[in-house]
């Protein structure tokens, strides 16, 4: 498929942000993705005509071509394990619509039925099986969703110079109607502070990401990395620190990365439902990377081996 003339996911989301700000003003959060998708797509010959929650095992969201005439449906899974991610899933599917769909015309319905397969079925938990092109497409849809739901300028103004606390993250997830994982990941992606997040299960990192400045200082989280003893994450959900409103200060020697260890403030979240724990690590100082020669070039895919969490 040619990409010529196609908007980047970020540009497509930002254009809608400008529109929403113009129409709704500052009080436009959380973004009503369903209304937006229905309204925007009316301008096309193959509009989105329905957004439905369904209880079908096997996919989290779907952009489905209508079978009888040009148009689309967005379907999202209502199973409990996907709770809190519905808005992100809708935005992801809307992203496929704007960025990736093959536009449907009456010519595709010559015999009164759609024959070819135009659908997008999104299976984040099986992404290890994705081919490169599929992975790129899925990441673009996620990027679109992230920027549509959480515009960076607005997010930045909500946080200001404050330390990230449990309450502040709660405010962010409420404002944007997204999961804790999506909100934390977004923060890591744009913050100028030295921060990192780790998602773990059974004592090992599933996925992690460091902010740009933390990465420059040698904070690199590999999938499979053991969660260190003495971390709040390792102490578990029953520990006195598990629900601490503020990050817990830990001395150096606990969290250790490729260029050594330093003190860190750790805020941990435990989800029994998902069977995972999440830690946000905030570092003081400027790190030790400035005078150390560069390691191998960083590739964003190196930081995770499976679909990043939403
Ligand atoms: Zn998808």
Image (cartoon, rainbow, N blue to C red):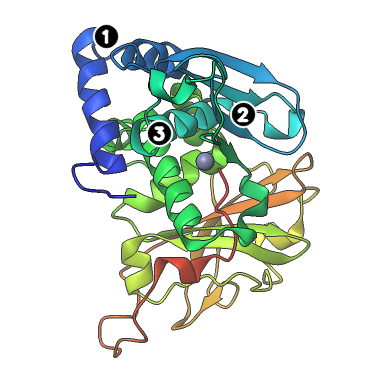
Asked whether residue 153 appears in the rendered view, the answer is: no
Q: Residue at x 26, y 81 (%)?
A: 290
Q: Viewer-nearest of labels 3 and 1? A: 3
Q: Between 109 and 267, which is closer to the camera in this rendering?
A: 109
Kindly tell me whether mark 3's CB lies below 8 Å from ligand 1.
Answer: yes
- Relative to 216, residue 210 above or below: above
Residues at circles 2 and 1 in contact by the CB criterion of under 8 Å: no
Mark 2 or 1, nearer chain start: 1
The x, y position of residue 103, in whole percent, is 37, 29
- Relative to 104, residue 277 above or below: below
- What distance separates the C-alpha of mark 3 from that of mark 1? 21 Å
Image-quadrant location for residue 11: top left
Asked whether residue 177 appears in the rendered view, the answer is: yes
Q: Quadrant of the C terminus?
A: top right
Q: Secondary structure at mark 2?
A: loop
Q: Residues within 10 Å of mark 1 (few under 14, many from 20)?
A: few
Q: Is residue 289 left or right of residue 242?
A: left
**Residue that label 1 marks:** 24
Q: Secondary structure at mark 3?
A: helix
**Residue that label 2 marks:** 84
- What distance separates the C-alpha of mark 2 from that of mark 3? 18 Å
Q: Is residue 205 left or right of residue 235?
A: left
Q: Residue at x 42, y 11 (%)?
A: 35
**Residue that label 3 marks:** 95
- What distance separates the C-alpha of mark 2 from that of mark 1? 24 Å
Q: Between 28 and 133, which is closer to the camera in this rendering?
A: 133
The x, y position of residue 301, in whole percent, is 46, 67
Q: Residues within 10 Å of mark 3 (few under 14, many from 20)?
A: many
Residues at circles 2 and 3 in contact by the CB criterion of under 8 Å: no
The x, y position of residue 198, in whole percent, is 57, 59
């Amino acid at each position: 498929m040619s990409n010529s003339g196609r908007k980047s996911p970020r540009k497509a989301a930002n254009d809608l942000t400008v529109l929403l700000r113009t129409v709704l003003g500052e009080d436009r959060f959380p973004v009503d993705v369903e209304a937006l998708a229905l309204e925007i797509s009316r301008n096309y010959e193959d509009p989105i005509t329905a957004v439905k929650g369904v209880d079908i095992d096997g996919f989290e969201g779907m952009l489905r071509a209508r079978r009888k005439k040009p148009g689309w449906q967005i379907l999202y899974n209502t199973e409990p394990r996907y709770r809190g991610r519905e808005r992100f899933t809708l935005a992801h599917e809307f992203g496929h619509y704007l960025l990736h769909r093959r536009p449907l015309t009456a010519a595709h319905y010559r015999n009164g039925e759609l024959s070819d397969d135009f659908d997008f079925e999104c299976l984040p938990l099986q992404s290890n099986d994705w081919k490169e092109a599929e992975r790129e497409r899925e990441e673009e849809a996620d990027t679109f969703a992230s920027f549509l739901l959480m515009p960076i300028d607005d997010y930045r103004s909500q946080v200001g110079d404050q330390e990230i606390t449990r309450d502040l993250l709660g405010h962010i997830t409420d404002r944007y109607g997204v999961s804790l994982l999506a909100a934390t990941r977004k923060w890591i992606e744009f913050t100028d502070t030295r921060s990192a997040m780790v998602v773990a299960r059974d004592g090992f990192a599933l996925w992690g990401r460091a902010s740009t400045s933390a990465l420059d200082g040698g904070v690199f989280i590999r999938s499979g990395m053991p969660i260190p003893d003495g971390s709040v994450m390792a102490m578990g959900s029953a520990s006195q620190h598990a629900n601490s409103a503020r990050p817990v200060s830990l001395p150096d020697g606990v969290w250790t990365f490729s260029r050594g260890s330093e003190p860190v403030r750790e805020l941990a979240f435990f989800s029994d439902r998902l069977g995972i724990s999440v830690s946000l690590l905030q570092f003081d100082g400027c790190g030790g990377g400035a005078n150390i020669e560069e390691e191998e070039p960083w590739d964003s895919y190196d930081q995770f081996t499976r679909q990043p969490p939403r």
